[in-house]
Image: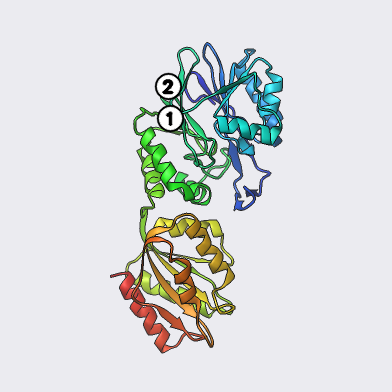
Amino acid sequence: MDITKDIRYIGVNDHQVDLFEGQYKVPNGMAYNSYLILDEKIAVMDTVDERFTHAWIEKLTVALGGRQPDYLVVQHMEPDHSGSIVCFMHTYPKAQVVASAKAFTMMENFYGEGYGDRRIVVGEKDTLSLGKHTLTFLTAPMVHWPEVVVTYDDADKVLFSADGFGKFGALDVEDPEGWACEARRYYFGIVGKYGMQVQALLKKAANLDIAVICPTHGPVLQGDLSYYLNLYNVWSSYGVESEGIFIAYTSVYGHTKAAAELLAEKLTARGCHVSIADLARDDMAEAVEDAFRYGTLVLASTTYNAEVFPAMREFIHHLTERGYRNRKVALIENGSWAPMAAKTMKGLLEGCKDVAFAETSVRILSALNESSEAQLEALADELCS
């Protein structure tokens, strides 16, 4: 696939993977993207997972058309992108590898080889001329590993963005939900903790004339890039993307579930947009995604072992470790003899910045009754006011 006249896509699709990074469900597979820049000198941008090394080398050989590559640019050392470095360097013994100093340390740790006599170490604003194309390297530490660099090609105005702007899904599967859905789940699952670092990278990118973004996962982004850039700005600044309320609940015998669903009905009847998830059964990464997407979060949990249900504790931990902030949170607790869930959930969120708790808190004693239903009515009024 041609990206521009001189830039080719040489990535691969993975339909063997069931859990990306050992935890994220990827029913539509994954893409490991690699690119080739053809000029007086030739640069290969990243490799692919070692399970696809042979297929990747074949694609690269065809795209080279008998020429030899001069450089391999390693932007990110996660094995799904660096897994074919050793094979590449063996296949093309005259090529040099270009990466950050930290990347070369990781190269030695992963593969036992740092390519001392074939390495080019690059840092902030270092350049590499290929002829017509000049590559400028920008450091992007913790987006989402410390060794990351991204690369700007001034000739074709292309930003090779490493894992930035990536999404779940192979490129040979049509995604009816569009880019944002799986890009959002990818961002908050994998990059979300590092909002400040993403903001720093976006500020660097703002000084560049970018026509194309080439990430290491997901589709190449072209045309009006403001849509993607604006979403990344909202996500990394912990802003509210969509007006709405997300209800996350856990339930043992169905009574807390009934309360969560009744609240959802009341909110919807008042014209509020509502999303709801059972944390024990639904995809946890999608629940985290919705918690960051919407401005209001309702946590509904049974009391369990004098605290909170395990799936709820896990969910809140996912939020706090990713810097959850700038949201309104409402609490619903259930307990047959000593309700403690609300106190525990509030305590788990204490370290979050700019989290405001709803004035109305709902307490259920085993099952819904007139009193607790009235509390739900009051909470719906408050949240939709």
The residue located at (56%, 16%) in the rendering is: 42
Instruction: Tell me what residue is drawn at x 46 percent, y 47 percent.
Output: 194
User: Is the residue 174 above or below the residue 289 in the image?
Assistant: above
Residue 259 visible to the viewer: no
* 2 or 1: tag closer to the N-terminus: 2
Disc number for residue 156: 2
**Colouring of the image:** rainbow
The location of residue 312, given as percent across then percent down, is: 53, 68
Residue type at tag 2: Asp
Q: Work out whether 82 lies above or below 239.
A: above
Q: Nearer the viewer, residue 106 or 69?
A: 106
Q: Which mark is residue 212?
A: 1
Q: Amino acid at mark 1?
A: Val
> How many C-alpha atoms fall within 10 Å of the one at disc 2: few (<14), some, or many (≥20)?
some
Name of the residue lying farthest toward the left: 385
Describe the element under mark 1 as helix, strand or loop. Answer: strand
- For residue 273, side relative to residue 81 (left or right): left
Gap between marks 2 and 1, in whole Å? 8 Å
**In the structure shown, which secondary structural element does the residue marked by tag 2 occupy?**
loop
Left or right, residue 89 beside residue 353: right
Quadrant where the C terminus sits is bottom left
